[in-house]
Image (cartoon, coloured by chain):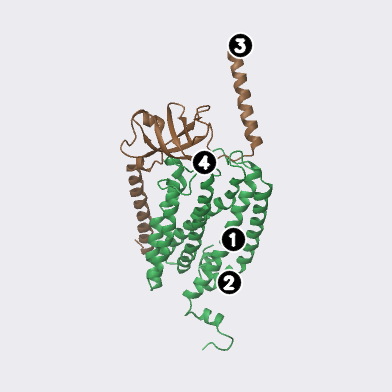
Chain colours: A brown, B green
Amino acid sequence: MKPRRQRMLAVGLTVAGIALATALTLQAFKENMMFFVEISEIEKGNYPEDRNFRVGGLVVEGSVRREIGELELSFDLTDYENQLTVNYSGVLPDLFREGQGIIAHGRLGDNGIFMADEVLAKHDENYMPPEVAESLAGHAAAQEAVLNSEQQGQ
Amino acid sequence: MWTFFHKLASPPHFYDLAAKFIPWFGVIGAACVAYGAIAGLFYAPADYQQGDAFRIIYVHVPSAYLSMMAYMIMAVSAAIGLIWRIKLSHAVAAAAAPLGAWFTFLALMTGSIWGRPMWGTWWEWGDPRLTSELLMLFLYFGYMALRAAIDDTTKADKASAVLALVGAVNIPIIHFSVEWWSSLHQGATLVREGGPAIETGMLYPLLAMIFGFTFIFGALLLGRVRTEVLFRERRANWVRKLVLPEGDHA
């Protein structure tokens, strides 16, 4: 084997070996690499009971309850399968609104209510002007109306 | 074709060739960035969710992209240098590192400034995208420190090349972190199935910024490689001729 070939092989094998080792390590720590737990996982009991963790989901429309003049609020989170009630007291990020994806940090109480000490907002990878977003929402609503009327017609 | 590569790898030839490219790269880069900045800041529409705050994307995304691009250039040059023993390619790797570190720093800083109003936090430990990008900054630091610690250039080239190759495993991790694990950072907007998820009025300035940043990076890199070559070849005849005044070639 020519020395150059040998070096090529050595470099290739080193990179492949490190990639494999890293892939296996990451696979082993997959659970710990997750930034937040999904609500359905909590329902199954797959969450750390003895420490704080993060839970992610969408704020259910119409579920935000807050007393006037108080910082405390509560809202429901959903992943379209299960729901979780969250209590929180503090400042909310600008993007917090009903229907928005958010991540809450805290612990799950015995009563099944998540006591959050921090609420972060997620945003999606879509960027568009408000008019486009409105017209998209309009189209979706129109489509739904058509579907509903067709169903009623049957 | 091989003669072209052999010529390219010859330091004096590269030194002259790079000098011809630098002004062009600089002019094209400046023009793209000027268009991108004006169109992005003044003419692109505000975002439906984030309003005007989304405009930091025009610095954040090009920086983040170049932080990874610079690492790829560094790692590939290091591999070529190891396998084919081409000194010029070690010089390219050495020159790329500080530039990559700066773009990584820029990406982290603009991301942090963006995260505060939108997500509600400057920094979140445990987020895979944020943490893997920070890890890359430390890989750059480690690479530069290792180089600086070894006096013998040939030895420094080899040792740092191995480090650059080992760290390259982090590049796919950064890119796919938002797909493999749950994350605060959203998924990819530009490189995704079904095309970019960004309105064209916002997209074109962003592409212009990415091109502009890349050309400016190219100009900076070529300039840095030239000085690196000059220093490495300081005992060679062609450098003496270049540096010493006429008739003083003793």
Q: Which structural element holds mark 4?
A: loop
Which of labels 4 and 1 is toward the front? Answer: 4
Q: Which structural element holds mark 1?
A: helix
Say which residue label 4 marks: A93
Which of disc 4 and disc 3 is earlier in sequence?
Answer: 4
Amino acid carrying label 3: it is: Gly
Residue furthest front in the image: A69
Respond whether the residues carrying marks 2 and 4 are from the same subunit: no
Mark linked to residue B16: 2
* Disc 2: host chain: B
Amino acid carrying label 1: it is: Ile
B174, A53: nearer the viewer? A53
Which of labels 1 and 2 is toward the front? Answer: 1
Respond whether the residues carrying marks 3 and 1 are from the same subunit: no
Q: Which structural element holds mark 3?
A: helix
Say which residue label 3 marks: A153
Respond whether the residues carrying marks 3 and 4 are from the same subunit: yes
B33, B16: nearer the viewer? B33
Say which residue label 1 marks: B216
Image check: A145 left or right of A61?
right
Amino acid carrying label 2: it is: Asp
Q: Dot 1 surroundings within 10 Å: few (below 14), some, or many (20 or more)? A: many
